[in-house]
Amino acid sequence: MAASRSALIVGATGQTGRHVLQNLLASPHFTRVGEYGRRVTPIEEITTGKDKLEQKVIDFEKLQESGLSKEQWDVVFITLGTTRAAAGSAEAFEKIDREYVINVAKEARNPSVPQRLVYLSSAGSSSSSPFLYPRSKGLTEEGLASIGYSDTIIFRPGFLAGTNRADHRLAESIFGKVTGALSYFSNSLEIKVSALGRAIYFAGKLGSDGLPPAVKATKEGKGDAKFTVISNAGALKLAELQE
């Protein structure tokens, strides 16, 4: 890819997405950045790269009215996601976590040009899992890989540390203390959202072919629906890169 590119991010108001957006706005590699979502970042919170940011509030139930199909983005970042508890039901969770994600990727796809897709999934994702969360993530990964992007990269991080949520989650807090302690012995359990955001940015910039060997990225999928997978340990390595 050339030195200067355009990037679209959907899910930039989330815990990890906000760090991806910060990296994109600070990067000389991306000269045009689009932030689309149900909500967008308050403009007063943007301190760098405001001049290259295009924001648009969209309705995921009416994506044909979003204008996404009329735009052209070199790299599409999707960090959109939720939990069953936040969604209110299993059906609502799958609509947001899978249907919205796949639909927005389809809408942003321009078959006439090469495009890269980078998606934030989760460790343990598997379309054959008997559990709702990892199954939905696995099905989403497979759905995204089948859309036809030139390069599809999937992140599967462990526990997300360093979040700043308005709603306090007791179970998450307890689990975080456990993974925080164990992370001294293993690099596969936890990652700070700031580091993950940086890693996702670099993956979008470098692409599958440009990833350092130390990341130990793997390939999954079948036929034309193959995709690159970056684990928690790989994301930690990728976050160490410098511009």
Image (cartoon, helix red, strand yellow):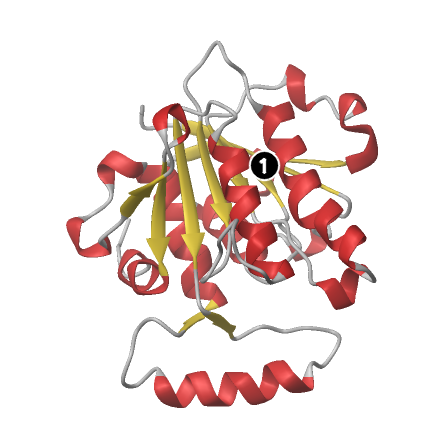
Q: Is residue 64 above or below residue 139?
A: above
Q: Position of residue 89 (x, y in %)?
A: 81, 60
**Residue of label 1:** 51
Q: Is residue 92 above or below residue 240?
A: above
Image point 46% across, 62% down: which residue? 124
Residue type of the residue flagged with mark 1: Asp
Seen in the image, is 134 located left or right of residue 184? Answer: right
Q: Position of residue 11 (x, y in %)?
A: 64, 48
Q: Is residue 13 above or below residue 30?
A: below
Residue 49 visible in image: no
Q: Position of residue 43 (x, y in %)?
A: 71, 49
Image point 72% across, 81% down: which residue? 168
Q: Is residue 78 above or below residue 169?
A: above
Image point 33% across, 59% down: which residue? 239
Seen in the image, is 72 located left or right of residue 40? Answer: left
Q: How many marks?
A: 1
In this view, which residue lies farthest toward the left?
Answer: 213
| Residue 28 quadrant | top left
Q: Position of residue 158 (x, y in %)?
A: 44, 68
Say which of 108 and 142 sits in front: 142
Residue 89 visible in image: yes
- SS of the residue at dot 1? helix
The quadrant of the image that shows the N terminus is: top left
Crowding around mark 1 (Cα neighbors within 10 Å: few <14, some 14 to 19, many 20+) is few
Image point 24% across, 54% down: which residue? 215
